[in-house]
Amino acid sequence: MRKPEDVVDAMIAACNARDIESALACFDEDVFYHNVPLEPVTGHAGVRAVLEPFLGAAQEVDWVVHKSVSNGVDCVMNERTDRFLMPKGWAEMPVMGVFEVKDGKISAWRDYFDLAAAKPLLEG
């Protein structure tokens, strides 16, 4: 079985490649996903509904992991800068992510960020 940090790294790599199917393969079918300033979603359909518009609208995606820690069992936390190349240029936002991994799949994902920093992404 893959280590929790390897599962999270694979999901981030898939998002950086704008490969939604490979990203979804890293998640449990019943995943709980919460961008904390916004409403949470569940399941692959919920994750797709949140990620696909950003991955699809961006010309490039570059989620830079600055620090990552894992308990080696079921939890990974990382400090990131999520970068999206939009038509008007790069939009960036600092993010703190918490991932719970069960049976080799991400079962819960919570990202904490300042909603004002996400405004350029939401505006395109």
Image (spheres, rainbow, N blue to C red):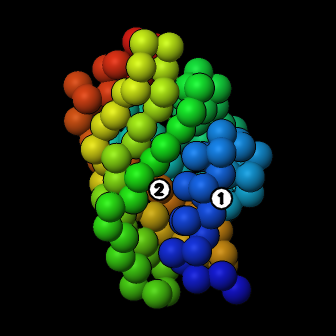
Q: Nearer the viewer, residue 10 or 31?
A: 10
Q: Which residue is mark 1?
A: 27
User: Given the image, on which type of amino acid does mark 2 rest?
Assistant: Trp
Q: Residue at x 40, y 79 (%)?
A: 70
Residue 110 visible somewhere in the drawing: no
- Mark 1 or mark 2: whose residue is earlier in sequence: 1
Q: How would you rate the neighbour count of disc 1 (Cα within 10 Å): few for under 14, some for 14-19, many for 20 or more?
A: many
Residue 13, percent across and down? 60, 56
Q: Residue at x 33, y 42 (%)?
A: 36
Residue 9, percent across and down? 55, 65
Q: Residue at x 40, y 42 (%)?
A: 82
Left or right, 20 with reference to 49:
right
What is the spatial separation of the Cα atoms under label 1 and label 2, in whole angstroms? Answer: 9 Å
Left or right, 45 with reference to 59:
right
Residues at marks 1 and 2 touching, judged by CB atoms closer than 8 Å? yes
Q: Quick check: 90 above or below 18?
A: above
Question: What is the number of the mark on residue 109?
Answer: 2
Q: How would you rate the neighbour count of disc 2 (Cα within 10 Å): few for under 14, some for 14-19, many for 20 or more?
A: many
Quarter of the figure with residue 89 = top left
Secondary structure under tag 1 reads strand
Secondary structure under tag 2 reads strand
User: Given the image, on which type of amino acid does mark 1 rest?
Assistant: Phe
- The quarter of the rendered structure image containing the N terminus is bottom right
